[in-house]
Image (spheres, coloured by chain):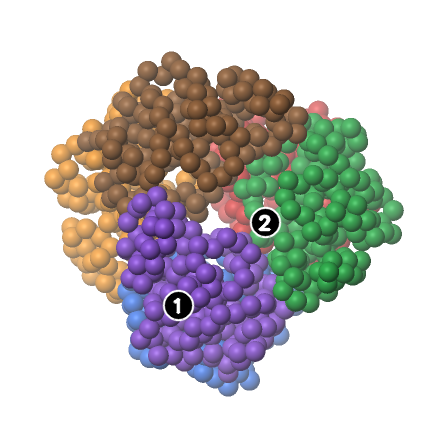
Chain colours: A blue, B purple, C green, D brown, E red, F orange
Amino acid sequence: MNQKAIYAGTFDPMTLGHLDVVERAAKIFPELVVAVVAETGKNVLFSQKERVDLVKKSVKGLTNVKVTLFDGLLVEYARAQGAGVLIRGLRAFSDFEYEFQMALTNRRLAPDIETLFLMPKQDYSFLSSTNVKQVASLGGDVSEFVPPAVLAALTRKLKR
Amino acid sequence: MNQKAIYAGTFDPMTLGHLDVVERAAKIFPELVVAVVAETGKNVLFSQKERVDLVKKSVKGLTNVKVTLFDGLLVEYARAQGAGVLIRGLRAFSDFEYEFQMALTNRRLAPDIETLFLMPKQDYSFLSSTNVKQVASLGGDVSEFVPPAVLAALTRKLKR
Amino acid sequence: MNQKAIYAGTFDPMTLGHLDVVERAAKIFPELVVAVVAETGKNVLFSQKERVDLVKKSVKGLTNVKVTLFDGLLVEYARAQGAGVLIRGLRAFSDFEYEFQMALTNRRLAPDIETLFLMPKQDYSFLSSTNVKQVASLGGDVSEFVPPAVLAALTRKLKR
Amino acid sequence: MNQKAIYAGTFDPMTLGHLDVVERAAKIFPELVVAVVAETGKNVLFSQKERVDLVKKSVKGLTNVKVTLFDGLLVEYARAQGAGVLIRGLRAFSDFEYEFQMALTNRRLAPDIETLFLMPKQDYSFLSSTNVKQVASLGGDVSEFVPPAVLAALTRKLKR
Amino acid sequence: MNQKAIYAGTFDPMTLGHLDVVERAAKIFPELVVAVVAETGKNVLFSQKERVDLVKKSVKGLTNVKVTLFDGLLVEYARAQGAGVLIRGLRAFSDFEYEFQMALTNRRLAPDIETLFLMPKQDYSFLSSTNVKQVASLGGDVSEFVPPAVLAALTRKLKR
Amino acid sequence: MNQKAIYAGTFDPMTLGHLDVVERAAKIFPELVVAVVAETGKNVLFSQKERVDLVKKSVKGLTNVKVTLFDGLLVEYARAQGAGVLIRGLRAFSDFEYEFQMALTNRRLAPDIETLFLMPKQDYSFLSSTNVKQVASLGGDVSEFVPPAVLAALTRKLKR
């Protein structure tokens, strides 16, 4: 029985939707690793260090949650960490095709690692990092969408 | 941390897709209850007792799996059992609307109980009990779709 | 410019999701008819009279909303009423196929009548009458899902 | 190379959408069998004989199209007919889950028979037999939805 | 009752699908603003001025329609304009996830502004600006896809 | 009756999913052209020549299959080749919106050419070229995802 779980993502930046998934997963699994993807191949607003720091500040207080930076294939990282479960948030507005394709690819590469989907709080179902950055960059108020540390960082970043 | 999980369904009859979900969940959760819905409000081919027996025969050997019959509201049954996790199989061909609606209704009724979705083996993604009964009733071979005990029972049932 | 709108449904019974659609539409359109389908071809829990009464009690106070019972083709009823707009609630968990098929059929039958979709409050996105009846019949608490008058009626109905 | 194709359905009754699929398929495949399902397990408006007759009248003039009645498992019927292709119409409003599940079940039962999907004319994408019967039974004009023979039969049937 | 409506988009360039939405909305709402997004963050083929001009030429004759250029957050622009309704075209081939996410984000930012979806003419359901530009750039005939002014502009633009 | 079929794509690089579609189509249609899109407008990993070569090596032995490079509008290329059928693979995880939009655009541009969809083997339903390149670039084993010639080429390409 392998109950170490990994929740991986770019977290550019972490939203309240991500945080909600972390909190739910941390209630079920004894050990949860939030793994921040180092190289995303996409333009990111926040650096690796910033993304990790913002996740760390946001999950502070959840004692069974660890935040790491990782590179390479997720399933190999999971194995190296001794984790048997990958967590994904599945929103009503998720890109199911992408989620399923990724889960099946991962299963093919590592049949011993299981992907579990959970639903974030309904209030956050429309939230995405892209969304948050877009609204913030247009001057909209995102204080209800992100943890306080992220709000402060976004404000600083977009002021420059 | 509540790691007792429930996988509920009509199981009329259990398919290899259901069994695959049970096996995957039993690798992650220390205790798994397969809960057979007593009153389905639908026409069933197999009686309550038959459905429970066929699930029991199919999951034999999985030592952390218990099979029960239940009636009433699933979340209340989960609470009575002391379970904190509901398991659902999510196939590429699932009825997402139905699955999400049920998960959200259950969360509203019992915020302390989490629904987790996992993907059955790709080979079984097209399988459903309805499907199996239809093919079998038309004389098709369903030996690749159901556990041996179910195959035998289906053959007996449809011969009559 | 025809701004008389119709919101039709079985309302067996009206939920807070339906009521939310009515309230939103009533803020946009000067006249809104909530049209209760008389013959549904399905088994209904509440009689025609009961369904109309429960809608009436629920929308009381909305001065530009009228509740009626109708039979026959919706677009012909709309024309008879002099309405140019059909309102539909579109939830994340809607059956889009059904909604679109109905809207296109109606447009084909009556090109002068437009279907407008609006989204009910996110909190109610999982709600449906079927859902409510099922939970209530299993003894679940549906007080957060339906208007007070409907709650009372459901309690009376299911006690019998 | 097996180019004999089968297009199976309940055809209760045939719509212009079905006819469009037949016409498109008949341009590609040298032999096309339109196979009317005898026992549907659902309430049908038209008898087996009526459904076959209405399809026959509708496809008259298409010299490479044959209309038959069949019972049992579709893939076995296809084999008995020496057909290697099953045709399905895939509308924007199709029930993909159902279509894919059926296609995969059929492939599992008969790997030598291929399901090909084609899109009916966009104008007919909202059409279904259920739809047509519903509109017609409520007194709506369905002359743009069905072939002339079906229109006449519907009118007679619903008058009674 | 706020019946001023806004239909916003990049319109790079306007298609007959967009125009159809404008015409339908202009029949329902007394005032309609077609708001062209100034900065799109994407590569555009047509400049701000060109996009506005092409929309203006296309909607000429619709006396209750005004065309504007806007920058920043749509809901704030709507408020500044005194508009209470946002119009979106919802095609069978829409990206529902995106549409719903945007509508819910907007509702969260401005609960007083309602998003209404309407369906463009079925014939235009496959149309998108991207689509039109791609076909035109490959030398295909797009005269059935765009208003005359846009066709002329596309021809000039792609000749260069 | 026009039975010459075209299966077009970027093939950057060909996967076992693509190859499966080719093999299935080659069993149904007497002549099949696999048409490699020359200019994709996207960043490609493999050059035109490499993509064509890898397809050629992969389909070797299928005597009714020809591999070509093409530029411009697909339907015009099809006409120039005298082909009447376009083949598309439709996976459970396909982007239906994109597939349908493309098929309808093509039908509008060339009503005489029919798009037929077929389902690749279930095992390959999660496969895409993007997917394969991503896994390979992260050092994952893709030998079960691509034909041998592509595996060798990927290894060489990514080593550099």
Q: Is residue D34 above or below residue B2?
A: above
Which sits in the foreground, F23 or F40?
Answer: F23
Q: Is residue A67 above or below residue C12?
A: below
SS state under label 1 = helix
Judged by depth in the image, the label closer to the viewer, 2 or 1, is 1
Which numbered dot is residue B53? 1
- Image location of residue F147, percent across then percent down: 19, 51
Badge 2 crowding class, 10 Å Cα cut-off, few under 14, some 14 to 19, many 20 or more, is some
Q: Amino acid at mark 2?
A: Ser
Can you name the residue that lies furthest to the front here? Answer: B160
Q: Nearer the viewer, residue C91 or B51?
A: B51
Does label 1 lie on the same chain as label 2? no
Chain letter for mark 2, please: C
What residue is at 62 percent from the left and 59 percent from the top?
A: C134
Q: Is residue F88 left or right of residue C31?
A: left
Residue drawn at x 30%, y 59% is: B152
Residue A58 coordinates in the image, percent (x, y): 55, 77
Residue hosting label 2: C94
Tell me the residue at 53%/54% (across/down). Answer: B42
Is E81 situated above or below F27? below
Residue F49: image quadrant is top left
Q: In which quadrant will I find the N terminus of chain C?
A: top right
Give amino acid for label 1.
Answer: Asp
Q: Quadrant of residue F143?
A: bottom left
Is C143 situated left or right of A76 in this image?
right
Label number found at residue E76: none
Check the image and report above or below for F15 versus B117: above
